[in-house]
Image: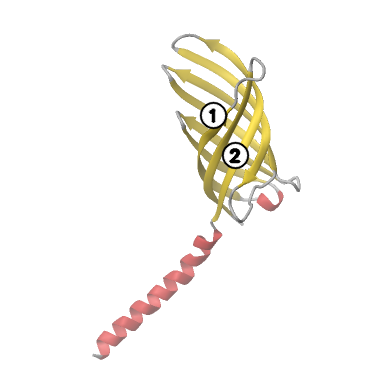
Amino acid sequence: MVIKKANILSCSLFGILGLLLFAPIAESQTPFDVTECGAGSSTVAYQSKEISIASIDLKGLIFSHHENKVFNNCTFHVVAIAKTEDGKRRSDSYWKIMDPDGDIIIAEVVVLGPEKTMKLLHGTGKWKGIKGEAKGKTSAIGKMIEPGTIQSCSRYVGTFELQK
């Protein structure tokens, strides 16, 4: 009976210790849910039936759907290279995201077909040490207002943490 109580107490202590050790990790993850809408230009470097290569330059605004309003009213500038080969789309883009205070986040977005993966790579000011990831999808594509332009929106849902 004494051994059984000791085992229960021991397991309880290890459980509490585990919660204390891992709670800061779980608490350091901040969720975000944003839509970015951008407009800009696309320059086709090569186009054929089989393959198309283009550069993309976009600027726009981000707004938050999450109650924490993280990244709300941030502006951004994106540079990208896009390839469509045999009907399959891929693009690699790099983002400069600036918050209303002027602090910067650098992100990378890889698009494979309809799927988008954003990685937060670097930050300045309050975003120094930022790391995170989000999944996204295009939510709207406008008709070209002029040849060689792009107008679109995408929604991203993910988490980030600030490493000290």
- Asked whether the residues under the numbered discs 1 and 2 touch, taking CB atoms below 8 Å apart as contact, a structural biologist would say no
Q: Is residue 39 above or below residue 13?
A: above
- Residue at 47% x, 24% y is 89
**Above-or-below relation of 45 to 140:** above
Q: CA distance from mark 1 to mark 2?
A: 11 Å
- Give neighbour class at mark 2: few <14, some 14-19, many 20+ (Cα, 10 Å): many
Q: Which residue is mark 1?
A: 92
Q: Position of residue 96 (x, y in %)?
A: 66, 37
Q: Earlier in the sequence, mark 1 or mark 2?
A: 1
Q: Residue at x 45, y 9 (%)?
A: 49
Which amino acid, mark 2? Ala
- Which quarter of the image is occupied by the N terminus? bottom left
Write down the residue under mark 2: 107
Name the kind of residue labelled 1 in the image. Answer: Asp
- Residue 109 picture quarter: top right
Residue name at image x 64 percent, y 16 percent: 148
Residue furthest right in the image: 101
Q: Position of residue 105 (x, y in %)?
A: 65, 43
Expressed as whole percent of the image width and height from the top left, the position of residue 102 reads: 75, 45
| Quadrant of the frame with the C terminus | bottom right
For residue 6, above or below residue 28 = below
